[in-house]
Image: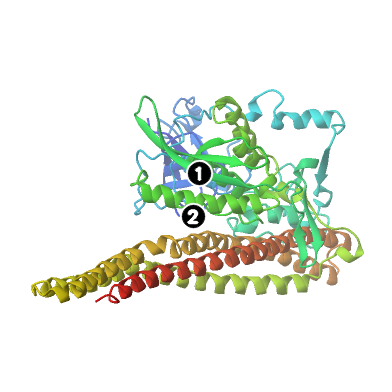
Amino acid sequence: MALRARALYDFRSENPGEISLREHEVLSLCSEQDIEGWLEGVNSRGDRGLFPASYVQVIRAAEPPPPARYANLPAGGFEPLPPPAAFKPAAQQPPPAAAPEPFPLPPAAAAAAGYPFPPAPYGGSYQPSQGSDDDWDDDWDDSSTVADEPGSLGSSYPDYEAAGGAASGRYRLSTRSELSLGSRGGAGGGHPAGHPHPPGGGGGGAKSSATVSRNLNRFSTFVKSGGEAFVLGEASGFVKDGDKLCVVLGPRGPEWQENPYPFQCSIEDPTKQTKFKGMKSYIAYKLVPSHTGQQVHRRYKHFDWLYGRLAEKFPVISVPHLPEKQATGRFEEDFISKRRKGLAWWMDHMCSHPVLAQCDAFQHFLTCPSTDEKAWKQGKRKAEKDEMVGANFFLTISVPAGPGASLDLQEVESQVDGFKAFTKKMDESALQLNHTANEFARKQVTGFKKEYQKVGHSFKCLSQAFELDQQAFSAGLNQAIAFTAEAYDAIGDLFADQPRQDLDPVMDLLALYQGHLANFPDIIHVQKGALTKVKESKRHVEEGKMELQKAEGIQERCNIISFATLAEINHFHKIRVRDFKSQMQHFLQQQILFFQKVTQKLEEALHKYDSV
C-alpha cells in the first residue's frame, strides 16, 4: 500500500520544487525518509514536490484499526478528518505538539537528494545529470552521524552542562533572558533556537503588553538565516574560543580581524582518474596549501560539498560561487582548463577571507590526506553537525565594546543602502562587460581570423599570378608578396589565440564577482530585517508598551549583525580593488604584447621588399 500522510497545517509553497498543503489534506508520499526536515510527495491536486515533514502526520498501514465507535470509517487508514472543533471524542489523544517550522532545504542536502539548487519545479526543464562525476553515493558513507558517536560534538553538550560549564575555552552564550519579549509570539520556551512555531502554535502570554512581531514570510532570508531568532533573543549555545569571529574597527570602519597566519593554495595538474575497475571516471585536482606544503587531491564534488557547508554556516559572509557544473563534455581539455582557472579564483578568495580561511571545514578540506578516507568522513560529519549555524552563528561574532564602539543605526542604514545601489550598478555593468567581452572574443576567434586569412589568401593568389612571369627581376617581388600572405595568415591565428590570454581571464573574474553580487541581496536583507525589529521596539518604548531594557537588547543584537555586515562590505571592496587592478594590468599587458607580435609580423613582411 502506498505511503500516505495527513496535513496538520496549511502550507503555502513559495519556492520552486515545493507544493502547497491544506489542513487535513491526504497526500501520497514518495518516501517516508525525510531530507533535512522535508518530505517528497503528491498532494490531492496532483502536484508533486517538497513540503515540511513537521507539517504532516504519516498514516501507517500497520496501525491498529480504529475503535468500534469509528467503524463507519473506511478501512485501510484514516481519510481526511473533520476540523478539530467539530470532531472531539472523549477518548481522543491530545494533538501532537506543534513542531518547529523547518528551514528550507539547504543546498548540500538538495544536491545530495538529487535536487538542483534551488529545487526546480516538477515537470520543468531541469533534468538530473546521469553518470556525473559529482555523484554522492559512490565513496562517502553517510549512514551514521557524529551525533551518534561517543564523544562527538553533539553528545558533549549535555556533559558540559552537567559539569556546570567547567570545560576549558567554552562559553555558554544565550539571549534567552528576554524570552518574555513578544518575539516569542506568546509561545513557551521549549523550542529550539531559530525554529519558529508552525501556524496555530501558542502558549503562555508574554509579560510585556507589546510584542515585536515575527515576519509573516517564514521563508525570508532574515528568518532562514536565524537572524530573526537571534535579534529576538532566542539563540543559545556553547561558543569555543576557536569559533569566535572578531570584528575590529579599522581605518575604513568595521573590518574582520586579519588572519594571523595567512596562506595561499595552488590548484594544479587536473588528472583523469578511475575507480571500480575503470567503470567510473572523474577529474582530480592537486591542491598544495602553502601553510602545510602537503599536497592533497580533491574532486569537484568535494568543492561542492564544502561550498554548501560554508554557505549554510555564514549567512552574512559572501561565500564565492564555484564554477558551474556541466553534465556533458566534462573530460574535454578546454572545459577542464577553464574549470581549473575558475577553481583557482575561488580558492584565492577563500584564502583571502579572514573568516572563511580559518573555518574548520575549509581547513579539513585543505589538510585531510586524500588517502585517509576514515579521517575525511569524520571531518565531513563533524562539519555537517556544526552547532554554530542559524541563530547560533551570530553568537560567535565578537564586536568592539565600549562607549565609542556603538554604531549609529541611521548611518549604518545609509551605508548599506549606498552599497546596495553600488552592487546593483556593478552587477549591471559586469553583465554588460561580460557580454561585450564574450562577443568580442567570438569575433576574434572566428570573424577576425577568417578576415585576416582571407586577405592573406588574396595576396597569395596575387603572388601566384606574378609567378607566371618568368622574368628573373620579378622573383624577389613574388617572394615578398607570398611572405606578406603568410604574415596575414599568422596574424589571423594570433587573433584566434589572443582571447585566452586577455579576455578569458577578465570574464573568469567577472563570473566570480557576479557570484558575490548575487550573495549580497540576502546579506543586506538580514541586516535590514534586524533594523526593522529595532525600529519596532523603539516605537513600543515610546508608546510605553515595552521595557527599555528589552528594546536595548534587540538593538545590541542588531548592532552585532550590523558590525558583521559592514565588515563584509569592507572586505568586498578591499579584494575588489586588488583583483580588478591586477586583472586590468594583466589585460593591457597582454594587449600590448599582442599588438607587438602583430607589428613584428608586419615589419618582417615590410623588410622583404627592401631587396626587390
Q: Identify the residue at horizontal 34%, vertical 51% (top origin).
A: 123
Q: Mark on residue 386?
A: none
Q: Quadrant of residue 172?
A: top right
Q: Is residue 36 visible?
A: no
Give SS at disc 2: loop
**Is 391 on the left or on the right of 488, as rendered?**
right
Residue 268 position within the rendered picture, expressed as x and y whole percent measured from the top left? 50, 44
Label 1 sits on residue: 268
Instruction: Pick whichever, 387 or 544, lies toward us.
Output: 387
Q: Is residue 124 above or below residue 270?
A: below
Residue 95 position within the rendered picture, expressed as x and y whole percent measured from the top left? 61, 39
Identify the residue at the far right of this view: 403
Q: How is the image coloured?
A: rainbow
Whole-angstrom CA distance, mark 1 to mark 2, is 44 Å
Q: Is residue 501 above or below residue 408?
A: above
Residue 91 position within the rendered picture, expressed as x and y whole percent measured from the top left? 60, 32
Q: Identify the residue at horizontal 25%, vertical 66% (top origin).
A: 486
Label 2 sits on residue: 13
Callout 1, which amino acid? Glu
Give SS at disc 1: strand
